[in-house]
Image (cartoon, grey):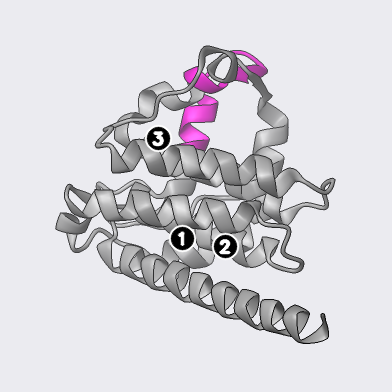
Amino acid sequence: MGESHDAPAGHTTATRLLRQSIASQPDTRITLDALLDPLRERAFGVLLILLAIPNFMPLAMGIGGVMGAGVMAIGAQMALGATRPWLPRWIGRRRLDRSRLLTLLDRLDPVMSRLERACRPRLPGLLRRPSSLLSGVMLILLGLMLALPLPFTNYFFGALLLAFAFALIERDGAVLIAAWALTLASAGVIAGLGEVLILLLRGGA
């Protein structure tokens, strides 16, 4: 099992927070509601970590659409001012295997450890409204891009989801700004490529 990385006194890192929530559950299979309940407003970030994980695994085609829809739902709730995520009952009662969750966290440890070293509490105003509305809109945009059938983008969008997650959990406005910028830049690149493709198709018609 990976170890949590050092953090300033009184500050709990994203990895440590998630591991503590998993460890606090007595059963070997944990409902999503039970996992998220003690995390309060930081549950948004933990949900984004869970949605980012499949992007680093070889999965069936179409999984990006499912993950993208989840990210858009989180973004919509943040944009509407929710302070903690709401899950449909059938999703909240879904059971996750504790050992599998810990194994997946260990697998992501190299990426997460780099993000944790970069993150620290700063620019707290960007984590509150009205800035949180912008974060919600950016997550809707990111979810939409994730749902598109774009090859070779899963790792990048997965890392971008982790950046949003860590910024929200560790209250880091600077990392949040970087995530906003990368989301907008990605959308610009995809829109530009789409225009080029349309022109090429029209030219060949």
Residue in view at x 37 percent, y 66 percent: 180
Q: Residue 61, image x and y in percent?
A: 82, 49
Residue in view at x 62 percent, y 13 percent: 27
* 1 and 3 marks in contact (CB < 8 Å): no
Q: Which residues are magenta?
A: 18-33
* 2 and 1 marks in contact (CB < 8 Å): yes
Q: Residue 16, image x and y in percent?
A: 46, 43
Task: From the viewer's perspective, tell me whether residue 30 is left or right of residue 7.
Answer: right
Disc 2 secondary structure class = helix
Residue 118 visible to the viewer: no
User: Distance of mark 2 from mark 1, alpha carbons?
Assistant: 6 Å
Front-most of 167 and 17?
A: 167
Does label 2 or label 3 sit earlier along the sequence?
3
Disc 1: CA contacts within 10 A as few (<14), some (14-19) or many (>=20): many
Amino acid of disc 3: Ala
Residue 5 colored magenta?
Answer: no
Amino acid of disc 1: Ala
Residue identified by numbered label 1: 163
| Figure check: 188 above or below 68 | below
